[in-house]
Amino acid sequence: MDIANYKDKRVLITGGLGMIGSTIAQRLVGAGARVTLADAYLPLYGANAFNIGAIRDKVTVVKADIRDREAMAPLVEANEIIFNLAGQVSHNDSIENPFLDTEINYIGHLNVLEIARRLNPTVKILFSGTRLQYGKVEKIPVPESHPQLPLSPYALNKSAAENLYLFYHRLYGIPVVLFRITNPYGPRGQVHHAGYSIVNWFIRQALENKEITVFGDGSQVRDYIYIDFLAEAFVKAGVAPGMNGEVFNLGSGQPSTFKKMVETVVKEAGSGSIKYIPWPARYINVETGDFVADISKLQRFIDWRPGFSLEEGVRLSCAFYRQHLAHYL
């Protein structure tokens, strides 16, 4: 699984200008891959040209939407590995507009798989699912075998897409690796709204010395993973043997209360305040309760660990946004 195996490999990253895609791209360029970034530049999501400023002359950038079969066909056909990260990213927005979520998070992925089946059946595709696929959990840490009872169209479509990938792997032999990601945060993430990466959103509010609103008492437990370690797992899995057709949790494996996270943000930012309010009905209905991922399966397949503490990750993230926040507003 040496990333030197990426030397001269043709790699496509959909959602390539977002936090995860651009961080993976940085690593792949360093490993000598020939990287193409496809992004639809949808306004609510994380596409940001600033994310690839340091590597802009070393990658190809294409405006393309995974819902557009005509645009995606030559991209899927031309590459050896695809990090298929494009998606509608908001759990709650999917309830307001389930059709959009289905178009992007299910039909879009069906498009990519169908193109692969017809034009490039040996292409390896890595998919970014979510811990929300599990719904309310029965035990912690949560293994991949835990039942899936999604509580929103977003989670439901992620589960459906995951099964779609497994179906195409079983029937057509397309190599796929599926991840269920916990709560990512860190540099290069969007900070326009709280729909994706709540940690990053809180960092923006704290740096602007605003009041951060927390639902309930903040005692709910979460598993936060810093973007660099998430990207490292994806990159290693892209060339690791024996992972095809497998599903993996991808998180830190470490529990942190919501209260601890937001207090850490305010402390590291050196500004901001916290206000606790009752749970709004539209949120409590989809609240999954405590969550910590069992990451032991992934660690059996690749040499990987999630690295440093939440405190260190928040410190580095605050430093990044303190310097570059203007590029993300």
Image (cartoon, rainbow, N blue to C red):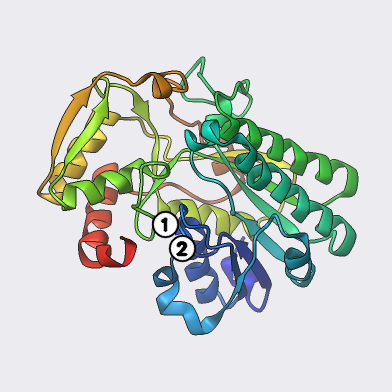
Q: Is residue 26 left or right of residue 163?
A: left
User: What residue is at 42 percent from the left and 23 percent from the top?
Assistant: 282
Q: Nearer the viewer, residue 62 or 175?
A: 62
User: What residue is at 72 percent from the left and 59 percent from the top?
Assistant: 68
Give the structural element (helix, strand or loop) at label 2: helix
- Can you give x and y, in whole percent of width and height, for residue 255 in the image? 35, 30
Q: Nearer the viewer, residue 214 or 178?
A: 214
Q: Nearer the viewer, residue 201 or 84?
A: 201
Tell me the residue that label 2 is attached to: 23
Disc 1 marks a residue whose amino acid type is Asp
Q: Is residue 118 at least partly visible in the picture?
A: yes
Vertical placement of residue 279 versus 319, above or below: above
Q: Is residue 87 left or right of residue 263?
A: right
Decide: marks 2, 1 in contact (CB < 8 A)? yes
User: What residue is at 89 percent from the left and 59 percent from the top?
Assistant: 118
Disc with the residue nearer the chain's start (2 vs 1): 2
Tell me the residue that label 1 is attached to: 228
